[in-house]
């Protein structure tokens, strides 16, 4: 494979990166830390929370993955990946120190300028927490730029909660309010039981014009979470959601993710609720 050390020369050429660390989050879901072999590139690689990258393995293929790390902690890229398909199967067979190839970042990411100085409400369901973990830690690392921070996360069972240890450690902080729920609890589960929208009843009074919400989760979740946000009278353009679907090239060339005249890989994957009302099939 021809490897480019300066991705600006050809956006389709990947750069070599080493797997620094990996461990299972839950069954068939694994956390990866990777770092570019070129240390200067590793330390200067910039991205916005909500963007994604393309990861390839020679002889196997390439696939898009959300970036789960925060750009406020440069040097290492973090990914949360579910085993499904030949690329992830090959990736799960890799060992620490093995080399993979990365190009990107792609997509728009969350509108941070709009969010600064506001309360932030993060609502995640299931695997949707993987891209939202990036904005979560970005806000925590730049705490003086944001007001109140609320993190709502729902999964089906406690065993399916991703990043469980670190998210429960966040509950010990005083600058974030974390609310977790499961559809079906076990005896040791001490948090809420029910769908993620149930957690809205535990929120303090929300000033809709001073609040920005970000959402990611299974498709069925969006409708009901948006209903709750509209009850709080959040403006439609202050509700951001990441809709990663059918992305392939990352550059708007293959048309694989095209919906009407927009390309999810370039115009998204982050859209506002207002956007979804004006383009068919976005959600």
Image (tube, rainbow, N blue to C red):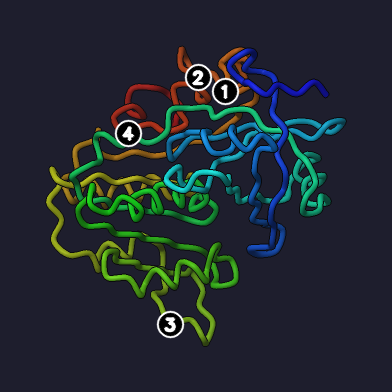
**The quarter of the displayed image where residue 171 is located:** bottom left
Residues tagged 3 and 2 counted as in contact (Cβ below 8 A): no
Which tag, 3 or 2, sits closer to the chain's start? 3
Q: CA distance from mark 3 to mark 1?
A: 41 Å
Which tag, 2 or 1, sits closer to the chain's start? 1
Residue 28 on image: x %, y %: 72, 58
Quickly name the residue at label 2.
263
Please give the name of the residue rendered at 61% of the width and 39% of the height, measured from the top-left corner.
65
Q: Quadrant of the C terminus?
A: top left
On residue 257, the disc is 1
Depth check: 218 or 1 in front?
1
Quickly name the residue at label 3.
190
Which tag, 3 or 1, sits closer to the chain's start? 3
**The quarter of the displayed image where residue 247 is located:** top right
Quickly name the residue at label 4.
111
Q: Is residue 31 above or below residue 238?
A: below
Which tag, 3 or 4, sits closer to the chain's start? 4
């Amino acid at each position: 494979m021809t490897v480019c050390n300066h991705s600006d020369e050809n956006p389709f050429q990947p750069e070599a990166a080493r797997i620094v660390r990996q461990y299972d989050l839950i069954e068939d879901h694994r956390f990866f830390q990777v770092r570019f072999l070129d240390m200067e590139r590793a330390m200067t690689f910039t991205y916005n929370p909500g963007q994604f990258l393309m990861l390839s393995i020679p002889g196997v293929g390439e696939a898009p993955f959300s970036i789960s790390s925060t750009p406020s902690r440069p040097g290492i890229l973090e990914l949360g990946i579910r085993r499904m398909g030949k690329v992830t199967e090959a990736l799960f067979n890799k060992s620490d120190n093995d080399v993979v190839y990365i190009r990107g970042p792609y997509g728009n990411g969350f509108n941070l300028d709009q969010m600064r100085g506001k309360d932030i409400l993060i609502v995640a369901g299931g695997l949707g927490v993987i891209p939202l973990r990036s904005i979560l830690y970005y806000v925590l690392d730049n705490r003086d730029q944001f007001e109140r921070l609320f993190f709502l996360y729902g999964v089906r069972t406690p065993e399916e909660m991703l990043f469980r240890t670190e998210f429960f450690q966040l509950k010990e902080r005083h600058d974030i309010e974390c609310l977790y729920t499961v559809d079906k609890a076990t005896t040791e589960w001490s948090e809420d039981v029910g769908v993620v929208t149930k957690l809205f009843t535990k929120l303090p009074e929300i000033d809709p014009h001073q609040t920005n919400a970000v959402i990611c989760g299974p498709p069925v979740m969006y409708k009901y979470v948006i209903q709750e946000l509209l009850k709080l009278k959040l403006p439609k353009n202050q509700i951001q959601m990441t809709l990663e679907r059918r992305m392939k090239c990352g550059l708007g060339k293959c048309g694989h993710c095209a919906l009407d005249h927009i390309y999810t890989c370039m115009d998204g994957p982050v859209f506002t609720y207002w956007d979804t009302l004006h383009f068919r099939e976005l959600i």
